[in-house]
Structures are given as structure tokens and as C-alpha cells.
């Protein structure tokens, strides 16, 4: 049975797959940074009554699977997540990050990729995010996901929905 969350005047189930890309796709994120980032993202989402249910990343981007509370302004929430994670990572890993940027350069690219996980079961999405983090066969998708996701060509989603990563497996 589908688990629904509720608030004072709503019953909901909103799951989003969000991708942040580092500025210039620089490969700066380490495993230690990803661990710190996970806790920062969990705190920001909890403060906004949302939940981080999946997280993984590679040196130049991160994937978040979010259970969203519908009262949130999605654009503002993503801005909060990016700014908080950038600020904390720059404080704790200043030496590493300053090697690849000058002055007060941004950690994250301005764009973002946000995909509704509508028809795909969360177990499948968790599997996909875990596979991407493990660098195993990124062009192979579970059959259930192929029919429940649409293809996009936004440069903010270069590893998620464009040909060469998942796009060739996804039909419109």
C-alpha cells in the first residue's frame, strides 16, 4: 500500500529526484564532503518538513531523492539546500575547494535538475541513485523505470536525462 504523509489540510506523496552540478563540472567532491553534505541536507529538509530519502554523488554532481512537503516553494528550497551545503563545505574543506576556485566562487552551478518520480517505485529510484554512485553501468536502467520516466535535454541534467547516460533508454 502507498504510504501517504499528511499535514493540517493535506494528504500527499511527492517524491522528487534533484541533481546539483558543480560549477564548470569541476570534480571536487570527495567522499568526506558527501558525508558532511548529507547531514546538512537532512537538517535543511527537516527544517522545511521534508525528508531526504536517498542521496549519492560523484566528484562533479549529487543526486537527492526528496519526500517533499507541499507547502514548500520548490525553487526556494533548492536554493536553501545549495547555499547551506556550499557554505558548510567551504568552511570545512576550504583548502581543497580553494585549489579549484578563486575568491568567493560558487560551488554549485546556477541550474538544477528536478524530476518528479511519479510512476517509478522508490525502490527502483534508490537502486538507480545507488548504481550511479557506484559507477556501475550507468546506461542500464531497471525495466520498470524505462516506461515511467520522460526524457529531457536540460544542460542542468547532463548525467540524468540526456542521451549517453539514461536518455537512450528513455522514450518520450
Image (tube, helix red, strand yellow):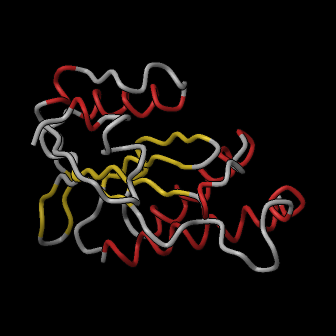
Q: Is residue 124 left or right of residue 104?
A: left
Q: In this view, does 30 lie above or below 92?
A: above
Q: Residue at x 36, y 44 (%)?
A: 160
- Residue, far right: 95
Q: In this view, does 140 lie to the left or right of 39?
A: left
Q: Depth check: 16 or 133 in front?
A: 133
**Res. 53 image quadrant:** top left
Q: In this view, does 95 lie above or below 78?
A: above
Q: In this view, does 163 lie above or below 61?
A: above
Q: Which residue is drawn at 69% across and 71% down?
A: 87
Q: In this view, does 40 lie to the left or right of 77?
A: right
Q: Depth check: 37 or 2 in front?
A: 37
Query: Residue 40, how many percent across, how many down?
Result: 61, 59
Q: In this view, does 25 lie above or below 141?
A: below
Q: Residue at x 28, y 64 (%)?
A: 69
Q: Which residue is drawn at 49% across and 73% down?
A: 110
Query: Residue 54, how many percent across, how many down?
Result: 43, 41
Q: Depth check: 137 or 53 in front?
A: 137
The C terminus, quarter of image: top left
Q: How many labels does the image show?
A: 0
The N terminus, quarter of image: top left
**Res. 105 image quadrant:** bottom right
Query: Residue 41, how many percent across, how many down?
Result: 54, 58
Query: Residue 46, how many percent across, how many down?
Result: 46, 62
Amino acid at each position: 500500500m502507498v504510504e501517504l504523509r499528511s499535514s493540517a489540510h493535506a494528504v500527499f506523496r511527492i517524491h522528487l529526484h534533484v541533481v546539483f552540478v558543480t560549477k564548470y563540472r569541476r570534480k571536487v567532491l570527495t567522499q568526506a564532503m558527501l558525508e558532511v553534505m548529507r547531514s546538512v541536507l537532512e537538517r535543511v529538509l527537516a527544517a522545511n518538513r521534508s525528508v531526504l530519502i536517498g542521496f549519492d554523488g560523484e566528484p562533479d554532481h549529487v543526486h537527492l531523492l526528496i519526500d517533499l512537503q507541499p507547502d514548500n516553494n520548490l525553487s526556494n528550497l533548492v536554493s536553501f539546500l545549495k547555499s547551506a551545503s556550499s557554505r558548510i563545505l567551504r568552511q570545512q574543506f576550504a583548502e581543497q575547494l580553494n585549489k579549484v576556485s578563486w575568491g568567493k566562487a560558487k560551488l554549485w552551478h546556477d541550474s538544477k535538475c528536478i524530476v518528479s518520480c511519479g510512476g517509478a517505485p522508490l525502490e527502483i529510484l534508490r537502486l538507480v541513485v545507488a548504481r550511479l554512485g557506484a559507477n556501475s553501468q550507468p546506461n542500464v536502467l531497471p525495466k520498470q523505470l524505462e516506461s515511467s520516466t520522460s526524457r529531457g535535454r536540460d544542460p542542468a541534467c547532463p548525467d540524468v536525462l540526456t542521451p549517453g547516460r539514461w536518455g537512450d533508454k528513455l522514450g518520450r
